[in-house]
Every structure is written in structure tokens, then in C-alpha cells.
Amino acid sequence: MPSELKTNAEPPLRIGNRVLPSRYFLSPLAGYTHLAFRRAVRELGGLGLATTDLVQATLLLSQTRKSMELIATTPDDRPLSIQIYSGLEDELVRAARWLEEHGYEGIDINMGCPMAKINGQGGGARLMCDVDRAARMVAAVVAAVRLPVTVKMRLGWDERSITAPELARMCERVGVAAVTVHARTRQQGFRGRAHWQGIRAVVEAVETIPVVGNGDVRTVEDAFRMRQETGCAAVAIGRGAILDPWIFRKIQQAEQGHRPTEPSATEQIDFLVRHFRLMTEQHGAYSCVLFRKYAAWYGARLGIPEDLEARLRRLESIAQFDTIVEEIRRRHGQRRSAVPTALMKLPNGPTDRR
Ligand SMILES: Cc1cc2nc3c(=O)[nH]c(=O)nc-3n(C[C@H](O)[C@H](O)[C@H](O)COP(=O)(O)O)c2cc1C
């Protein structure tokens, strides 16, 4: 049995009043970790907590169609936190109250997004530049709701300004229930390596709140190693879960002392179908358009013959989807499957206007 396999059951993790079924979370990836994907992954097992894509507080308060789509959920999509952002305290507070009044169970404040348009409004990672102001905003949100409030941050703005330990400590003092640390600076965007020692620095800076480590976890071994090396209480997995939606199930198997199993070809095709069906529950026939961006990913992952992948990329109707899936099942094995690595469009970061 590989040394990474764990057999000792840990006590469940608590975040505020929530007791989470596992310590391995889905990190939000705007445009990917939508409701259908979250539900499909939860059905595979092992997922502890998911968070919605970031939602701008003002748009939430105006209940725009897009923001309502982003916070759409179903009873099986639990535990779930809603991630909000704003550069304005009052907006964050009102959005948090709105979420509480509408029955949501957890609020996550984004202080990690590197996109210029979000930082330009004072939100996302920009908040890490002024930790006093950021902590005041968080304090106001915590005071306004009874729900657990968490914060997702980066290590800091750039390598000369590593503010995460100080900010996390201040967040803890004002009553934040947990912090997630993406172990890159804003300057790094999504490039370069995640510096896990930055997560350790945050773990050492806080007194008792759980620190959720995040960045570059792609395998079961990575997840356990992040916990060992940083002492973090939980791990959030983003791109690794798109590349391998079974990663949470595999971690759970390893924690129970079993060797993690790879999904069979049938299970993988069933996942593709389930993902699409759950999407149609929310978006109807428009799912055909939404699903196109997954074609290349599923194509590589499942070894879908190129002509079928091309048809998925131009998917037009639900009936056509059914025909393509029949073909995929029939012709599986004609193309070698590969782990797709560069198929996800990364959000803009420091390369664009500040
Ligand atoms: C396409 C994409 C969209 C993202 N959207 C969000 C988001 O809405 N909110 C957030 O806090 N982080 C977002 N992130 C950051 C991820 O949650 C995560 O912190 C980062 O990708 C590092 O973790 P990973 O290596 O496990 O992917 C996004 C990342 C990517 C690549």
C-alpha cells in the first residue's frame, strides 16, 4: 500500500455551524463549476463542500438573470457556499443579508480574483493590498448575518506584499469561520507554481480557524501531501477536479484504506451524459451551446473519436447529443484517451490593464 494511503479516520471538519462530510472541497472555477457539474461530481462521492462561481454583490442585489443562474441550487447540491465580491462594504453586507434571507447556508468573500475588471472596482485580490480595510469589510459582513462567513484569498498582491497571514489573522479576530488560501500572488495570476509554504504561514498565523489550502492539487497524493506539508485542515481542488472529477471519490477510497479506482470507460461516458442531463434541467436546449466548451475536454479524457468530438463541439440539439453518445459508446477505444492539460481558458490576470 503506498505510504500516502491513509487509514486513520479524522474527525469531521466544522466550519462555523456546518459539519462537512469530507475535507476535500471543490474550488470555484467560473464557467465550469456550475450547478450541473457540482451535482454530477457530488454523485461520484467524496466531495466535502462546493462554492459557486463568484457573483458580484450588486448584480445579486439586482437579481440579474446571470446572477440568479450562478446561485441556482438544488437540495442535492449541499453543502454549498455562495461566493460574492465587491469593493464596497455596504454592497457586500446587503448581498450577505439577501443570501441569508433566501435560505443559503454559507457565504464566501472573494479576495483572490486577479482580473483587472474586478480589481479595478476594488474587489477580488485588490482587497489584499489594504488589510485593515479588508478586515473592516469582512467584520461588517460577519456582524450582519448568522451564516458562517469564509474568505478566499491569495498569498498577497505580489511577492513583495505577502499579506495573507496578517489578513487571515484579522479575519479570524472578526469572526470569519475559515479561510481558503490559493498559494499564488495576484501578480502570478494562474502561472508559475503554487507556493505551498505560503499556506503553512497562514496556518501558523491563525489560532483555531480551519485553513483550506489550494493550488496545483491534481492527484490524491498531491492532496495528502498538501495537508502534510502545510498543516491545512482541508484542501480545495479546482482544475484538478475538472481534469479528474473522480478525484474526491479516489481520496475517499484512499482515506478508507482502499486503493483508489480509476473510472471505467462506461462510468466516464455515463458521467458525460449525467453532466449534460443535469445541465438540461437548468438550461433546457440551451445546454447544447453551453456543453460545447466541454467537447475538447471530454474528447481527450474519454478518447472520443475526433469526428464525434467535432460534432459535440457544434452540438445543436438534445436528440443529436443522444445519437453522438450512442456512437461514443459503440466506438469507444478507437482513440487513445489522454489527460487534457491546456483546454481550460484561464481568467485574465495581471497581464491585462490594472
Ligand atoms: C477558469 C477559472 C475560473 C476561476 N474562477 C474562480 C472564482 O469564481 N472564484 C474563486 O475564488 N476562484 C476562482 N478561480 C481560482 C480557483 O478557484 C483556484 O483558486 C485556482 O485555480 C488554483 O487552484 P487549482 O490549481 O486547484 O485550480 C478560477 C480559476 C480558473 C482557472
Image: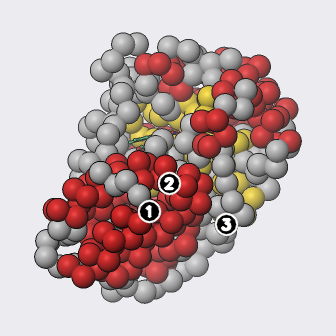
In front: label 3 or label 1: 1
Label 2 to label 3, Cα distance in Å? 22 Å
Percent coordinates x, y for residue 135 in the rendering:
68, 25
Q: Is residue 318 visible?
A: yes
Please report the residue visible at 82 percent of the width from the left and 44 percent of the height from the top.
102
Instruction: Name the kind of residue labelled 3 in the image.
Output: Asp
Instruction: Name the kind of residue labelled 1 in the image.
Output: Ile
* Label 2 CB-ligand 1 distance < 8 A: no
Q: Which residue was labeled with disc 2? A: 285
Left/right placement of residue 54 relative to residue 172 reads left
Say which mark, if any, is on residue 76: 3
Looking at this view, is 123 or 347 the one in front? 347
Looking at this view, is 169 or 19 the one in front? 19
Percent coordinates x, y for residue 51 in the rendering:
59, 49
Q: Relative to residue 61, is residue 28 depicted above or below?
A: below
Please report the residue visible at 36 percent of the width from the left and 64 percent of the height from the top.
320
- Say what secondary structure mark 1 lies in: helix
Q: Marks 2 and 1: in contact by CB < 8 Å?
A: yes
Mark 1 closeness class: few <14, some 14–19, many ≥20 residues within 10 Å: some
Percent coordinates x, y for residue 270 in the rendering:
41, 76
Q: Marks 1 and 3: in contact by CB < 8 Å?
A: no
Q: Relative to residue 118, is residue 241 depicted above or below?
A: below
Left/right placement of residue 106 relative to residue 56 reads right
Residue 352 quadrant? top left
Label 3 to label 1, Cα distance in Å? 24 Å
Instruction: Name the kind of residue labelled 2 in the image.
Output: Ala
- Say what secondary structure mark 2 lies in: helix
